[in-house]
Image (cartoon, rainbow, N blue to C red):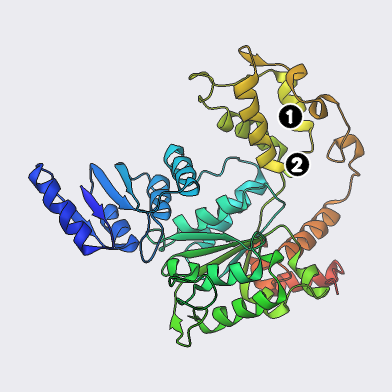
Amino acid sequence: MLVVDDDPEVRSLLGRVLTKSSWSTTEASSGADAMATLGRQEFDVVLLDVKLPDASGLDILRWARESDVDTEFVILTGNADVETAVALKEVMTRRDGMPHIVGDSPEIVDVVSMIARVAASDSPVLINGESGTGKELVARSVHLKSRRASRPFVSVNCGALPDTLLETELFGHKRGAFSGAVNSRVGLFEAADGGTLFLDEIGEMSPAMQVRLLRVLDSGEVRRVGEERAFNVDARIVAATNKDLNREATEGRFRWDLFYRVATIVIPVPALRRRRDDIPLLVQHFSAPGARGGQPLRFSADAMERLQRYEWPGNIRELRNLIERLQILHDGDEVQANALPAELTVVKRTAAEPAQTPLVSLQEMERQYVERVLQSTAWNKAQAARVLEVDIKTLNKKIRDFNIVRPA
């Protein structure tokens, strides 16, 4: 049994009690220690404290589930609350193992290829895509394929918190730093030390917070609110946004210097309507046995055609929610087209259909693709050249020959 608690007296007490009951015990005093130990040794049970100095017990539990660590967990906490209980239930009932990016379309194959290539570095990554396309899944995949996989993956939604709360969430605070700060608090940068910090919806961050974040990224030092002492942190930054940060910077809503700092590598995640051939695989993935007492959900050919013709404004999140709803409410062995929501049963011709897609020359197709790659990499020519598998000289020649102009 592995006992994970930052209090040495608690570890000692549990060790003595368990030893008397014929358990062989190993102790870990931090999240990093626990993950390193679990990575090299098998255990029957882990006693895990929720509150640890360098990570949340939830982060360790997520890491264990995603890394297919085969053991049972018993959670210890002295501060039970509904939010923690709900989060624990969500993590402990999710058994998908390693984050799995489903699909074999060229668009998603490019994403998987980019993940494999960038995981080996420590450079900041910006994941760009519409809401619901799976940006956090991509971020977790980058982390779990990197050398930092045994360290915490910590995430925060930058658009969900006001500046004062986001500041203390990211950087922590000293006891007494402000009214209500009865205890010191470790910030997410500290919690992610050695691992990855995922800044979701970074485009929603205010100008003032952008300045503070830039200072930390440039110096590698964090200062808790209310403290004068700064200390070094080693957290890889992976950010995500559903906005065009190039345009946001051009129009003065996002700092250019921060944009260049977080967009060293850009991974564009395609909308579901751009990868319609993946929809049958995604449906199969989400229709696995579950709410229907072990019976997977099946779709008729007509129903599947309707799913593939729909525009999916909510992307994969919308598809997953539809499948979950059908698993609970649908009667019968097979879903027919008339059982789908009204917006899916109305057949519409879309711009993606061949009859409405203008035919162009191969040269024009190449021009459009080169321009799209340049836009998706925010005109980072080195990165665009890698995606196109050409050298910089060849890329510059194509830009001249195709008369591609960078947006102002």
Q: Quadrant of residue 103?
A: top right
Rendered residue at 68%/78% (across/down): 208
* Residue occupying the far bottom of the picture: 228
Query: Viewed as shown, does residue 115 lie left or right of 35?
Result: right
Frontmost residue, 122 versus 353 = 122
Image vertical order of residue 270 relative to residue 249, above or below: above
State which quadrant residue 348 falls in: top right
Dividing the picture into quadrants, the one containing residue 325 is top right
Q: Nearer the viewer, residue 228 or 315?
A: 228
Q: Report x, y in % for residue 177.
A: 51, 78
Residue that protrudes farthest toward the top in the picture: 332
Q: What secondary structure is marked by label 2? A: helix
Q: Is 313 rendered above or below residue 78?
A: above
Q: Position of residue 290 (x, y in %)?
A: 51, 25
Crowd around label 2: few <14 · some 14–19 · many ≥20 (10 Å): some
Residue 23 is marked as none
- Looking at marks 1 and 2 on the same chain, the residue that comes earlier in the sequence is marked by 2
Residue 80 placement (x, y as % from top left): 41, 49
Residue at x 15%, y 53% (from the top left corner):
15
Name the residue that disc number 1 marks.
Answer: 307
Secondary structure, mark 1, is helix
Decide if residue 33 is on the left or right side of residue 125.
left
The amino acid type of the residue labelled 2 equals Arg
What residue is pinned by disc 2?
Answer: 273
Q: Is residue 130 left or right of residue 15?
A: right
Q: How many marks?
A: 2
Can the viewer see residue 123 in this picture?
A: no
Q: Residue at x 86, y 27 (%)?
A: 347
Kind of residue indicated by mark 1: Leu
Left or right: residue 227 compared with residue 261? left
Mark 1 to mark 2 CA distance (whole Å): 10 Å
